[in-house]
Image (cartoon, helix red, strand yellow):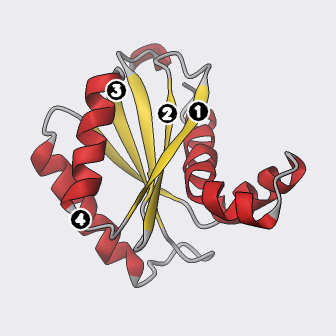
Amino acid sequence: MAGGHRRGGTLALDHGDKRTGLAYADALGITTTPLEPVRGPGDSRALLDRVADVLTERDVAVVVVGLPLHADGSESPRCAVVRAFAARLRERFPDLAIELVDEHLTSKAAEERLREAGYDARESRARRDSWSALVLLEDWLRRDGR
């Protein structure tokens, strides 16, 4: 966007087979918050319904979806699943910008942050997916200068 300004916040998704993490940034990209993860398969209607709920609750203009690339930038087998999910998002929410971004180091960074914040292993597991989405979101905000 011109000058790095955009209308609305950003929702980031760390898409998973058993759980999907969510995180939100306000329109200025100043406040970032991990949200409650969605438990269940990543192709479930419940996940799309939760995204719809977040869109109702918060001002969202962009949805950033983590794409699980290999370290060398090539696509992992899960990329096809994530791309299919992104297509479903675009179909259900045609007015939103949907961006796929490399997420290959987000889980490791999230685990490190959780450890530094003093969470034990059980608490970290419960929070890891949304904190991974938070790392993805913050990386995207930094990289795109928002």
Question: Mark 3 = which residue?
Answer: 60
Quarter occupied by the C terminus? top right
Question: Mark 2 = which residue?
Answer: 24
Left or right position of 142 against 96? right
Q: Which residue is drawn at 56% across and 77% down?
A: 70
In this view, 36 is above or below 106: above
Residue 25, position as x, y percentages in the image:
52, 28
Circle 1 sits in a helix, a strand or a loop, which is it? strand
Question: Mark 1 = which residue?
Answer: 33
- At label 1, counting other C-alpha atoms closer than 10 Å, the crowd grade (few under 14, some 14-19, many 20 or more) is some
- At label 3, counting other C-alpha atoms closer than 10 Å, the crowd grade (few under 14, some 14-19, many 20 or more) is many
Does the residue at mark 2 contact the one at mark 3 (Cβ under 8 Å)? Answer: yes
Question: Mark 4 = which residue?
Answer: 44
Badge 2 amino acid: Tyr
Asked whether 105 or 146 is in front, the reply is 105
Q: Earlier in the sequence, mark 4 or mark 1?
A: 1
Does the residue at mark 1 contact the one at mark 2 (Cβ under 8 Å)? Answer: yes
The span from disc 1 to disc 2 (Cα, nearest Å) is 5 Å
Badge 3 amino acid: Val
Circle count: 4
Q: Earlier in the sequence, mark 4 or mark 2?
A: 2
Q: Which of marks 1 and 3 is nearer the N terminus?
A: 1
Observer-side mark, 4 or 2, equals: 4
Asked whether 73 or 23 is in front, the reply is 23
Badge 4 amino acid: Ser
Q: Which of marks 2 and 3 is nearer the N terminus?
A: 2
Badge 1 amino acid: Thr
